[in-house]
Image: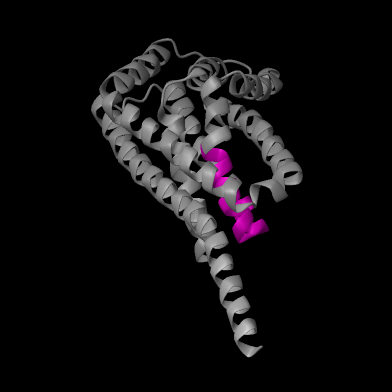
Amino acid sequence: MPAVLALFGQSFLLALSGALMPGPLLTVTISEALKKGTRAGPFLVLGHGLIELALITAAVAGLGKFLSRELVIGIIGIVGGLVLIWMGASMGLGSKQAARQAISEIDKGNAATSTGNFSSGLLRCIFLGITTSAAHPYWTLWWVTIGLGLMTKALQIGPFAICAFYVGHILADLAWYWAVAFTVSHGSHWLNAKAYRLVLVVCAVLLLGMGASFVISGSGILRQRADKPKTIAVYLHSTVGLLEAKR
């Protein structure tokens, strides 16, 4: 259970750090919140979550045995860790500009807030959540590297870990985009550029730490794998020596 909870927390933090960076889904959330109100956020995340659930299901069903190999786990750990370190460094260095850009977009949304018939746009929000995610290169990069790294960890723990990974990931997206939709639709100014930048810097530090952890873990697995043939060779050599001595 501790391992499952740890994976849940790690998944939540990694997903939140990605959601905080300005991107297509943030822009769509703001535009839809102007028309549909706060509830646009959760339904956009629903579409986002459906495509990710399909991706995880396909990966576990088709790649489960492949992802459980030590060589694959080690390589994915190192590559995913390096991507996390790059993301953390980029997020920290660009936090000032990213915060200004995000707050500017939210403020523009606040200035134009309007209401509309939400029920007529329900399917539109879900569809936009799917298409916006699938068309975003950063989303693909995240899942090919970091997402696979977390899934290999989850597969080693068990089925509950897969669920914890997915739930933690989606809850982070839901919390953030629901908050953005609420802020835009209600014209709230509780979030400013300084606070936003502070959150980005904290997330950047967490990304750097987790990236280093991934690289160290992946390197250790590959090192152990490389040492196995030597261990087997020593064992066989000693066994042959004992047999010869008995003769």
Q: Is residue 88 above or below residue 11?
A: above
User: For residue 242, which quarter of the picture?
Assistant: bottom right
**Which of the image's four quarters has the N terminus?**
bottom right
Q: Residue at 43% of width from left, 21% of height from top?
A: 184
Residue 96 percent coordinates (x, y): 26, 23
Residue 53 percent coordinates (x, y): 68, 38
Q: Is residue 167 visible?
A: no
The mark total stands at 0
> Foreground: 163 or 72?
72
> Foreground: 90 or 27?
90
Question: Which residue occupies the extreme right position in the image?
Answer: 61
Q: Provide the residue span drawn in magenta.
A: 146-165
Residue 193 percent coordinates (x, y): 27, 24
User: For residue 99, which quarter of the picture?
Assistant: top left
Q: Is residue 119 above or below residue 219?
A: above
Q: Residue at 54% of width from left, 42% of height from top?
A: 76
Please check the rendered image and state whether residue 149 is part of the magenta-colored stretch, yes or no: yes
| Colouring style | one colour
> Foreground: 241 or 138?
241
Residue 214 percent coordinates (x, y): 44, 47
What is the magenta segment's predominant secondary structure? helix
Please check the rendered image and state whether residue 218 is part of the magenta-colored stretch, yes or no: no
Question: Which residue occupies the extreme bottom position in the image?
Answer: 246
> Foreground: 104 or 206?
206
Q: Residue at 59% of width from left, 24% of height from top?
A: 133
**Which of the image's four quarters has the C terminus?**
bottom right
User: For residue 202, which quarter of the picture?
Assistant: top left
